[in-house]
Image: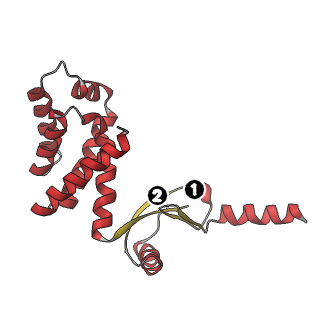
Amino acid sequence: MPEGSLARRYAKAFIEITTRVGVVDPVGKDLLQLAEIVEASRELRIALENPAIDRASRKAVLAEILRRQGGNPETRRLVEALIDRDRLGVLREIAHAYRALADETAGRVRAAVVSAERLDEARLGQIQRALERVTGKRVVIERDEDPALLAGVVTRIGSWVYDGSLRSQMTQLRDTLLEE
């Protein structure tokens, strides 16, 4: 079975469980953080996915990681289920599929907003309100900076991209001048 469909199946089951107990967003945050921690350490990833290491030891390691990051008890139970079924290798995909389902369920979308320099809260609020009018959904902004843009903002929501950067405008101007 392709990992994407497997991840979506687990994410859907986890959403159903966490919705019942009211911890959808905290578990989503925990899963993403845990996936990042596991991905960042090759040794940890190998140890957690190694069937030669007993499940109880692998569960104890993950329980300690979650305890240190302030993880939700429900997250621990869900991750233990992945260990029991030897599915920890798709944790990252499950975490991303879970977040997408949680966003869909909550009626929100994520927008990646990249600017040449850090945007102040007032400007970020303007962008967020404009995006909410366009999408009709609550927008969660994930911001980043890229000095190569020179000025302006590039926004991505799903497959939709609005490039209002100075770099893009200069490229368009150059292309127009070269055509003539």
In the rendered structure, which amino acid carries the disc numbered 1? Pro
Q: Is residue 147 left or right of residue 177?
A: left
Q: Residue furthest right?
A: 180
- Whether 127 is drawn above or below 32: the answer is below
Residue at image position (66%, 65%) is 166
Residue 11 point in image, percent of width and height: 26, 51
Residue at image position (18%, 46%) is 69
- Whether 59 is drawn above or below 134: the answer is above
Residue 17 point in image, percent of width and height: 14, 56
What mark, if any, has residue 147 been given in the picture?
1
Q: How was this image coloured?
A: secondary structure
SS class, disc 1: helix
Q: Nearer the viewer, mark 2 or mark 1?
A: 2
Q: Which residue is mark 2?
A: 144
Q: Residue furthest top?
A: 52
Residue 124 point in image, percent of width and height: 43, 72
In the rendered structure, which amino acid carries the disc numbered 2? Asp
- Whether 68 is drawn above or below 60: the answer is below
Q: Residue furthest front?
A: 1
Q: Quadrant of the C terminus?
A: bottom right
SS class, disc 2: strand
Residue at image position (38%, 67%) is 109
Front position in the image: 73 or 100? 100
What mark, if any, has residue 38 been given in the picture?
none
Front position in the image: 102 or 68? 102
Spatial CA distance of label 2 from label 1 is 10 Å
Q: Is residue 161 left or right of residue 55?
A: right
